[in-house]
Amino acid sequence: MDEEIMFEDATFTEYGDLSFENTTNGVSNTILYDGMKALLAPSLQAKSKAFITHCATYIDRNADSLVISAPYKKLLFIETRDSDPIFPMYNASKNDIKAIIKQSPQIYQTFRTLNNPLFFILTGLNIMYREDAKNALSREAASYASLFMALRFYSSRQGHLLPYENDYSKDIMEYTINHITEKFLIRKEKTILGVLKYIATDNDENLGDRLLQNPTDQNFKNYITNLSTRINNFLRNILTEYRKNMEEQNYIGESKERYNDENQNLREIANASSEIYDLTLRVYTKLKTSPLDSNILKIASSNSKMSATTIQNTISNIFKNEMDDIKKVITYTLQLFLAESKNKIEHVKSKYFMIYCLKVYRISNTVNPTLEAMKKILDDWMKIYGSQYLRLNRAATKSAFRKSMFVYIVAAITKYA
């Protein structure tokens, strides 16, 4: 079990004087939950979409720091832009949260470590949205509340624990990730965002469930500190390995590592897999949080000879119902381009990428399992979402319909990668 480490940068004095009255101590108090419920419940449902959009926009804005395979790039967190707007969104203020915290003896005892009102409003939002688990928007908002707190902790601890003054920090960090054992969570989840989602979800399913069943101040506190501890330990463990490699000057670079042909090929495959995963999540996140792009629609229309309106309507339905398969098509496309054809990652944003993808798309009777899997998804979309259009428009061919869906995703990869 992880050793509990409680921390945060600022103290309560950042938000004004907190003179805690020494109220009756007891682990059964529900002061925090009761106060948050009274404060947040009136606007909870009306603001779920706005809250989800706020969190998703933050992730999208910082994709370069999150959709990467190692914590070498600083995740910026600007309170006035990134966290402060959450309070008025629910007709609350930091002082409102502070007034609730002042009444809790559990927080009084550890006020130097649990010092940011953001933690408490996010925990309150998480538990209250989870109480409405039958509502899809509430479930999504609850997940974003815990993830956003994880992002805040990660940003804070990353700056304190990981050095960035070394010009080779990215290379050393990538070397570190490539050489640590499978017991490290980053090896399983592949990206920083994946790790933070995993930790946040696991915290919800353990400490969060306990808080949901028994919303005491102690469980409120444990939910926050456990999340901070796990992120702190995740970074500390990587930093330990990082420092060893920095001292030994181990890093990924042409002049540093020496491989025979077999090992070199294995490294290329591993690097390509990491690149594919990073790019897939970056493009997927952007597609999930952005409206349909008119320029991409035009590209799909001109390449398939289908109207942009038809493509827009169909893509909208696919994006609404098939995001998991969209992620698979992105992955398959990048796998064909980077891993199987060994093209360079910088070419993904070039015209050559579209030319290559269209050439691959035209291949018929393929025995390539990656291409077969991708075309099967496109065929399934055509059967589900294109049947009405194909019946009413004889000139439209199955090939054109399927091609329009594929070209939209390829053009999106080029734009968002």
Image: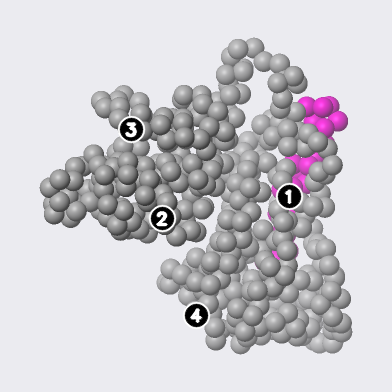
Residue 325 in sight in this render: no
- Identify the amino acid type marked 1: Lys
Q: Amino acid at mark 2?
A: Ser
For the C terminus, the quadrant is: top right
For the residues bearing labels 3 and 2, Cβ distance under 8 angstroms: no
The residue that label 2 is drawn on is 294
* Residue at mark 1: 74
In this view, the mark in front (3 or 1): 3
Label 2, residues with CA under 10 Å away: few <14, some 14-19, many ≥20: few
N-term-proximal mark, 4 vs 1: 4
Considering only vertical position in the picture, is 46 above or below 277? below
Q: Which label was assigned to residue 46?
A: 4
Task: Tell me the CA gap for discs 4 and 1.
Answer: 34 Å
Quick check: marks 4 and 3 in contact, CB under 8 Å? no
Q: Earlier in the sequence, mark 3 or mark 1?
A: 1
Mark nearer the viewer, 4 or 2: 2
* Disc number placed over residue 361 in the picture, else none: 3
Would residue 83 be seen by someone viewing this image from the given angle?
yes
User: Label 3 sits on what residue type?
Assistant: Tyr
Query: Alpha carbon of mark 3 to alpha carbon of mark 1: how far?
Result: 38 Å
Q: What residue do we see at 31% from left, 24% from top?
A: 367
Residue 320 relative to residue 14: left or right: left
Of the numbered discs 4 and 2, the one sitting upstream in the chain is 4
Q: Let me know if residue 281 is in the magenta part.
A: no
Residue under the point 57% across and 33% down: 346
The disc, 2 or 1, on the residue closer to the chain's N-terminal end is: 1
Describe the element under mark 1 as helix, strand or loop: loop
Q: Is residue 316 above or below residue 380?
A: below
Nearer the viewer's eye, disc 4 or disc 3? 3
Q: Which residues are magenta?
A: 221-250
